[in-house]
Image: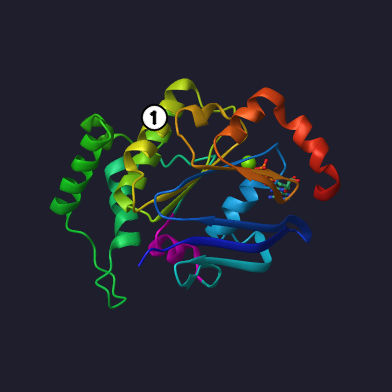
């Protein structure tokens, strides 16, 4: 069965303030969607609401993945169902090696025998998996021995995130990118990683303020999120139009509807 990530009329508030005012979005497996928009428009709110962050109150609407209602699931169950979220601000965990962290993540998300019982992936099998993915992503093996995000460069944080994504093999990956924070090295790592991992079984939503990343990750669809609504959807040409015009023209056009 081909599962579709389907967001219908999603309203989300933070501390009683409505931030998302009816988001509609459908992502099919294998598709890459970009969500672009000015700061404060609600892009990260959408990512956090999909993740199930308790601070983001879903007032109404639906989020389905296949026939599963994601909104009824706890955050860890959403991950188990195949949703992966890469966040703008990853945390450092000194004293935990990449390999250990990744094994814990894989066990949490994939370690189940189908009867709801937890079952961890044997170390040797995990190691084999990890080395395969590292090779696929052209990563140095020594990276697995590093401590998670502790003293990592921007590029290394992104590499850790991509490796985690590769191991979890999600059905849908949502990436809320730092807009100004990514240097060219980090940008290339994320993009090459996504381009390597995307395929008929994984849909990707790239959230970004700038279209810089979209010259590395080619989106099939581009959506403009302003003031809690997707005001415009189109193909890759929409990102180019933004490059030429900036958000001002679009903001002017949609100011009434967006307020
Ligand atoms: N944790 C929070 N507490 C209160 N308000 C928030 C919080 N996070 C975001 N907001 C508000 O929600 C709106 C949308 O923010 P956000 O989703 O971060 O936008 P974007 O990612 O597009 O820049 C902004 O007006 C912001 O001030
Ligand atoms: Mg944001």
Vertically, is 134 above or below 75? above
Query: What residue appears at the point 40 percent right and 54 percent down from the top-left corner?
Result: 29
Q: Which quarter of the image is occupied by the N terminus?
A: bottom left
Please tell me which residue lies in front, 238 or 118: 238
Residue farthest to the left, as pictured:
124
Q: Residues within 10 Å of mark 1 (few under 14, many from 20)?
A: many
Vertically, is 257 above or below 134? below
**Magenta stretch contains residue 259:** no
Please tell me which residue lies in front, 182 or 234: 234
The residue tagged 1 is 189
Confirm whether residue 192 shows in the render: yes
Residue 246 position by quadrant: top right
Residue 25 position by quadrant: bottom right
Please tell me which residue lies in front, 234 or 73: 234
Q: Is mark 1 within 8 Å of ligand 2?
A: no
Residue 190 in the image, given as x and y percentages of width and height: 42, 33
Q: Main secondary structure of the magenta part?
A: helix
Residue 170 in the image, given as x and y percentages of width and height: 37, 54
From which residue to which does the magenta span run?
73-83
Q: Is residue 56 left or right of residue 168?
A: right
Confirm whether residue 97 shows in the render: no
Query: What residue appears at the point 52 percent right and 67 percent down from the top-left corner?
Result: 64
Q: Secondary structure at mark 1?
A: helix
Residue 118 in the image, given as x and y percentages of width and height: 28, 70
Please tell me which residue lies in front, 87 or 173: 173
Q: Is residue 226 left or right of residue 117?
A: right
Query: What residue appears at the point 82 percent right and 36 percent down from the top-left corner?
Result: 252
**Magenta stretch contains residue 75:** yes
Q: Is residue 256 left or right of residue 236?
A: right
Query: What residue appears at the point 37 percent right and 34 percent down from the top-left corner?
Result: 159
């Amino acid at each position: 069965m081909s599962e579709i990530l389907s967001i219908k009329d999603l309203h989300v508030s933070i501390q009683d303030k409505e931030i998302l005012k009816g988001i509609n979005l459908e992502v099919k497996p294998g598709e890459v969607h970009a969500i672009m928009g000015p700061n404060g428009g609600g892009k990260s709110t959408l990512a956090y609401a999909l993740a199930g962050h308790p601070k983001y109150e879903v007032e109404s609407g639906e989020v389905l993945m296949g026939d599963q209602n994601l909104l009824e699931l706890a955050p860890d169950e959403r991950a188990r169902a195949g949703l992966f979220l890469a966040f703008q601000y990853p945390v450092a965990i000194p004293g935990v090696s990449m390999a250990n962290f990744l094994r814990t993540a894989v066990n949490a998300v994939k370690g189940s025998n189908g009867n709801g019982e937890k079952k961890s992936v044997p170390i040797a099998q995990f190691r084999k998996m990890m080395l395969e993915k590292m090779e696929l992503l052209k990563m140095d093996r020594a990276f697995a021995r590093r401590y998670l995000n502790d003293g990592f460069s921007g590029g290394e944080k992104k590499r850790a995130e991509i490796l985690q994504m590769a191991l979890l093999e999600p059905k849908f990956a949502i990436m809320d990118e730092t807009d100004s924070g990514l240097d060219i090295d980090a940008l290339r790592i994320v993009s090459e990683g996504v381009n390597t991992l995307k395929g008929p079984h994984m849909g990707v939503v790239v959230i970004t303020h700038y279209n810089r990343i979209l010259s590395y990750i080619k989106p099939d669809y581009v959506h403009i999120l302003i003031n809690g609504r997707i005001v415009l959807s189109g193909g890759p040409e929409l990102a180019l139009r933004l490059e030429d015009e900036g958000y001002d023209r679009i903001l002017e056009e949609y100011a009434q509807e967006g307020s």
